[in-house]
């Protein structure tokens, strides 16, 4: 298992380097935000919840992970458009194919 992980390391590093500029853009967009939603459905739901937890731990930004299906029942009311008090609410959607 460790050997397999070490063999995949150059691929993972290359992917991280290719997305670095995009990550900087996203970080500047989130800089002045107070809330963030991470959505996932099915197997992606626990990934969304863990992702929200990691965002909280690293950025001290209020992040919540929800099931994509549960969004329509309550949290949907918390998502604001560009006319909202704090502008658009950032939403990350995790889709597994």
Image (tube, helix red, strand yellow):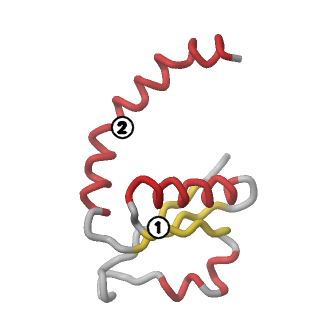
Residue at the spot 27% in from the left edge and 40% down from the top edge: 21
Q: Is 54 on the left or on the right of 69, as rendered?
A: left
Give the residue at mark 2: 19
Q: 62 above or below 83?
A: above
Nearer the N terminus, badge 2 or badge 1?
Answer: 2
The answer to whether the residue labelled 2 contacts the one labelled 1, judged by CB atoms less than 8 Å apart, is no
- Mark 2 neighbour density, 10 Å: few (under 14) some (14–19) many (20 or more): few
Residue 71, position as x, y percentages in the image: 62, 78
Q: Is 97 on the left or on the right of 52, as rendered?
A: right
Disc 1, SS: strand
- Mark 1 neighbour density, 10 Å: few (under 14) some (14–19) many (20 or more): some
Q: Nearer the viewer, residue 87 or 56?
A: 56
Q: Nearer the viewer, residue 14 or 35?
A: 35
Residue 5, position as x, y percentages in the image: 61, 19
Residue at the spot 40% in from the left edge and 23% down from the top edge: 14
Query: Number of numbered discs present?
Result: 2
Disc 2, SS: helix
Residue sitting at the far right: 42
What's the mark number on residue 91?
1
Q: Nearer the viewer, residue 68 or 35?
A: 35
Residue at the spot 65% in from the left edge and 49% down from the top edge: 96
Residue 75, position as x, y percentages in the image: 57, 82
Residue at the spot 26% in from the left edge and 69% down from the top edge: 32
């Amino acid at each position: 298992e460790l050997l397999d992980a070490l063999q995949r390391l150059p691929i993972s590093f290359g992917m991280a380097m290719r997305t670095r500029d995009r990550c900087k853009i996203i970080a500047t967009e989130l800089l002045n935000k107070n809330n963030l939603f991470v959505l996932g459905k099915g197997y992606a739901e626990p990934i969304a919840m863990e992702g929200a937890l990691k965002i909280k731990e690293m950025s001290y930004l209020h992040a919540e992970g929800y099931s994509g299906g549960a969004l329509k029942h309550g949290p949907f009311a918390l998502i604001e458009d560009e006319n909202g008090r704090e502008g658009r609410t950032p939403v990350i959607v995790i889709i597994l194919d």
